[in-house]
Image (cartoon, rainbow, N blue to C red):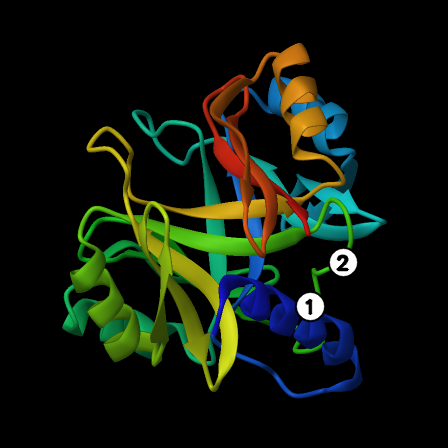
Amino acid sequence: MSIQQGLDRLDTEHTHREFSMAYETNRFCWHGAITSDLDRAEGFYAETLGWQVQIAEMGDGEVRMFAAAGVPLAHLARPSAEGIGSHWESYLRVDDVDASTAAAVQHGGQVLVAPTDIAPGRLSVVTSPGGAPLSLFHEADPTAEHHPGGDGSVRWVELHSKQIEADLAWLSATFGFGANKVDVPRGAYFVLEHGGVPRGGALASRSEEDPPMWLPWIQVSSADEALERAQQHGGRGVTPPMDVPGVGRVAIMADPTGGVLGVIAPT
């Protein structure tokens, strides 16, 4: 399966999932912008990606959320402890958070946040053997959907790993992900599949300075214009816009507080 075929299959899944009441697991269901400056990050993403900001009641407080076409897709929060830099979180929907967390540790991962109950469900945070954090989440509402489709939606999620073979083996043993290798000009790329359905991608980190992470890719109408807006509003380009055959035009940017994500204008 090519990367484009994977994206097309993912679009089909998002389009037709609303007709199924089954709790579908092992797919990315939510994201979080963790930032040292909530107001600055909020303004940046609203101006750069056109996201709306919504306020939701959660427990005893309120949570800021980003939405596209009125559909919430990510929350905005400060780091949970000192020393944690701005970054993006990705949430993998699982059937049993406790069992998945135990399996993650059994196969070489570590626990950053033990399983805990929150208003929308139950979650934990684990890391792969290569150190990439991943949030595991079971939603209290089995029909909840956070994929608006179109511009502003999370189009793809991609693991950047310094230990790609170990991390792929971990994803397979822990969650049952298959890795379909695709040869690309800059090296091997892996389409992560579960039950024959593409769920994301994985590749070896390009630089030793790059932290291990799951990188969200946001759909835009123009990667060049999105990057230009990012720079106008205090962000910076991490990679320049480039064409990826069969996929589209892509770029990676950082927000003013250091959180990194990609933008993709599909072919």
Mark 2 vs mark 1, CA separation in Å:
8 Å
Three-letter code for the amino acid on which mark 2 is drawn:
Gly
Q: Position of residue 221 (x, y in %)?
A: 76, 40
Q: Is residue 53 visible?
A: yes
Disc 2 vs disc 1: Cβ atoms closer than 8 Å? yes
Question: Viewer-proximal residue, 146 or 114?
Answer: 146
Question: Viewer-proximal residue, 239 or 66?
Answer: 239
Vertical side of 231 occupied by 73: above or below: below
Vertical side of 104 occupied by 146: above or below: above
Q: Position of residue 254 (x, y in %)?
A: 50, 25
Quadrant of the rendered structure where residue 206 is? top left
Q: Position of residue 262 (x, y in %)?
A: 54, 39
Badge 1 crowding class, 10 Å Cα cut-off, few under 14, some 14 to 19, many 20 or more, is some
Residue name at image x 60 percent, y 24 percent: 38
Quadrant of the rendered structure where residue 71 is? bottom right
Label 1 residue SS: helix
Q: Which mark is residue 38?
A: none
Residue name at image x 56 percent, y 50 percent: 31
Q: Is residue 136 visible?
A: no
First in sequence: mark 2 or mark 1? 1
Q: Is residue 106 left or right of residue 256?
A: left
Please name which of the two marks, 2 or 1, marks the residue nearer to the observer: 1
Three-letter code for the amino acid on which mark 1 is drawn:
Asp
Tag 2 residue: 149
Tag 1 residue: 11
Question: Viewer-proximal residue, 264 or 57?
Answer: 264
Q: Is residue 190 left or right of residue 247?
A: left
Vertical side of 224 occupied by 106: above or below: below
Quadrant of the rendered structure where residue 32 is? top right
Residue name at image x 73 percent, y 44 percent: 152
Tell me how many marks there are.
2
Q: Position of residue 100 (x, y in %)?
A: 33, 75
